[in-house]
Amino acid sequence: HCFGNIKSRISPGIPELVGRLTVLNTKIQGLAQQQYNATRVFCTFETEASQRKVLQEMTVGSITAYKNKTHQVNTKHLFRGEHVLLIREAEEPSAIRWMDLDEKMRTRIKQISITTIISLVCVFAVAVIVTTCRQISAAAAALAISISNALFPFIAKTITNFESHASETGKQSSLFVKIAIFRWVITAIVITVIMPFTSTLTNGSAHLIQSIYIIFFADLVTTNVLQILDPVSNFRRHFLAPRAGTQDRMNLLM
C-alpha cells in the first residue's frame, strides 16, 4: 500500500489507467464469449481478373437480394442453396468503418433524420439572421453569410460524427450534402427571396448586383482571414493540448 502511494505520487494518473485497463480487459473477455451474427463478409482474391469474374457472375440487384428472389439467380450461386447474396466491390480497408458495420438500417435512418433536422434548424436560424442583417445593410448581410459559411462546416462535422456509415465515403458524402445545401440556401436562395423584385434589375447599393458583389468580396476576405487565424486549431493546440492527461491525447490535439 505504501509503495502504491509512492508510485502514484511519482507517476500521477498511472493507477487510474491501470484500473481502467483491467476493467476493459474484463469487458473484452466477456464480449469474446458471446455469439455474433455475421453482417458482412469480405473476400480477397489473388488476381484482379478473379475479382472481376466473381462480380460479373454473382452481382444481383439490391431488391433481388433483400427479398431473396432465388428464382432469379443461378442455383450454384445461392448461399447454402437458399440465400441470395448481395455482392459488391468493397472499399479500401482503410476506408471501412469497422465499428459501424453492424448498425441496423432503422438506426442509421434515425441518426440521419436527426442530423438532417439539426442542419435544417441551422439553415432556418441563419436565414433569419441574414434577413435581419439585410434590413440594416447589404454589407451586414454579406458578412453574416460569409461567417456562417465558414463556421457551419465545423457544426456539420460534429453532427455527422453521430451518424453510422459503413465507409468513410458514405460519411464524407453525408458531410458534403449538408454543407452544400446550407451554403446554397443561405448564399443564393435567401438573398433571392428577401430581395424585392424591382431590385433585381436595377443598380444601386441596396440592389441585387451590388449585394452579390459584396457577398463575394466578404467571402473572399473572411475565409482567408479565418484560415490564417485558425482559431479552432490554435485553441486545441495551445489550450487543450498542454492540459491533456496523456501523451496520446496531446498528440491528437496537436
Image: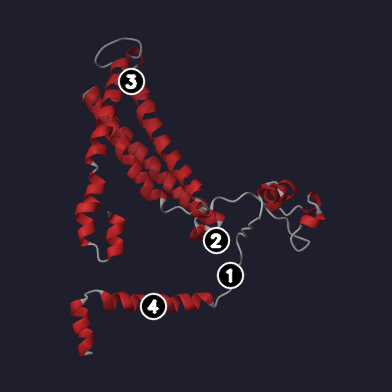
Residue 36 image point, x, y percent: 58, 70
The type of residue carrying mark 3 is Met
Task: Name the amino acid type tagged 2.
Answer: Asp
Labels 1 & 2 near each other (Cβ < 8 A): yes
Query: Is 175 placed left or right of 53 in the picture?
Result: left
Closer-to-camera residue (242/163): 242
Up the image or down, 1 lies above or below 36; here it is below
Image side of residue 232 versus residue 105, left or right: left
Q: Amino acid at mark 1?
A: Tyr
Q: Which element type, helix, strand or loop, lies under badge 2?
A: loop
Q: Please name the residue shown 75% across and 48% down the image.
A: 57
SS for dot 4? helix
Residue for badge 4: 23
- Crowding at dot 1, Cα within 10 Å, few <14 / some 14-19 / many 20+, comes out as few
- Mark toward the viewer: 2 or 4: 4
Going 23% across and 85% down the picture, which residue do you hit?
4
The answer for how far apart the CA atoms under marks 2 and 4 are is 24 Å
Marks 3 and 2: in contact by CB < 8 Å?
no
Vertical side of 71 occupied by 16: above or below: below
Task: Answer with left or right where residue 22 lies relative to residue 234.
Answer: right
Q: Earlier in the sequence, mark 1 or mark 2?
A: 1
Query: Closer to us: mark 2 or mark 3?
Result: 2
Dot 3 falls on a residue whose secondary structure is loop
Number of the label disc, if any, that sits on residue 102: 2
Question: What residue does disc 3 label?
Answer: 195
Label 3 vs label 4, nearer the camera: 4
Dot 4 crowding, Cα within 10 Å, few <14, some 14–19, many 20+: few
Q: CA distance from mark 1 to mark 3?
A: 58 Å
Residue 138 in view: yes
Residue indicated by mark 1: 36
The amino acid type, in three-letter code, at marker 4 is Val
Residue 57 - label: none
